[in-house]
Image: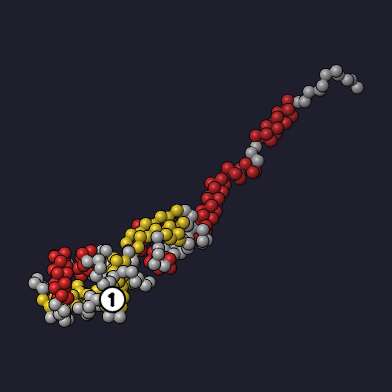
Amino acid sequence: MTFSARRPTRPAKTRRRLNTIAQGTLSAPSWTSTLWSTQRPKIFAVLLLLILGGALYVFFDTDYFYAFNFNITGARYVTTAEIEKASGIRGYNIFFVDARAVERAILKLPEVKAATVTTRLPNYVAIEIQERQPVFVWQRGAETFWVDADGIFFRARAPMSELPTVRDLDPSVIQPGQRAQANAVAAAWALRATMPESPRALEWSTGRGIAFTDERGWKIYLGDADAMPGKIAILRALIAQLVAQNARIRFIDLGKGDPYYQ
């Protein structure tokens, strides 16, 4: 047997076959890379659906984005329950809340003069209101209302003994939110401004205007607000004259121009 110092060489055919196998093994893609390249769009679509489904669940099937607790300021007489009910958005998804529409809804409460609504994610709703301020207590029949400077009737919610009270003798029905007769409120305002010492208990009727009963039991009819300072000046002079004469008077009527008494 003969030995050689050199490493024996393989036949060329065998060498080509081995090289082909080796190259094929190195260049052949793995099954994972093949799966990823072919299924990648589907995988992305499934992930997107999962994310979208999770977002929809959080948005619509949890309380996280729903309005249940309101921050209400400015309310003194109107209750928070009334404001929440008037808003119409309790339990609403915050994405569907129209702040301007809520303001208009709250303004339908007769007691509310102005309203501002603010929303913020995830479920914050702030409602700031300005209530109407009563300037007269208005009584008609067995019902009692408040009236503000704009002449709007709204429900009396507490005793207001410090305010003038007007007993309305007209027979028509008053509804909260209704506007009082402009001449009635104007006459009451004019009387209180011109004669602050007049009794707080006043009367109003369309036929004879504003009236009160003084400390002597005399009924004083003053008509509407026109020329109220002049009528009060005449009234004071006439009362001084009648008291000096020790006259017995049932009423004084200054609503028709010249004073008339009996």
Depth check, front residue: 248 or 134: 248
Depth check, front residue: 56 or 109: 109
Location of residue 36 with respect to 127 vertically, above or below: above
> Is 136 on the left-hand or right-hand side of 40?
left
Q: Say which quarter of the image contains residue 97.
A: bottom left
Q: Position of residue 33 (x, y in %)?
A: 62, 41
Q: Amino acid at mark 1?
A: Gln
Tell me, yes or no, if residue 23 can be seen here: yes
> Is 80 on the left-hand or right-hand side of 7?
left
- Quarter of the image where the C terminus is located: bottom left
- Quarter of the image where the N terminus is located: top right
Residue under the image location 35 percent in, 57 percent down? 100
Q: Position of residue 66 (x, y in %)?
A: 47, 60
Q: Say which quarter of the image contains residue 259.
A: bottom left
Residue that extends furthest to the top in the rendered view of this protein:
5
Q: Which residue is mark 1?
A: 139
Depth check, front residue: 125 or 186: 186
Location of residue 117 with respect to 224 vertically, above or below: above
Secondary structure at badge 1 equals: strand
Q: Say which quarter of the image contains residue 166.
A: bottom left
Location of residue 106 with respect to 246 vertically, above or below: above
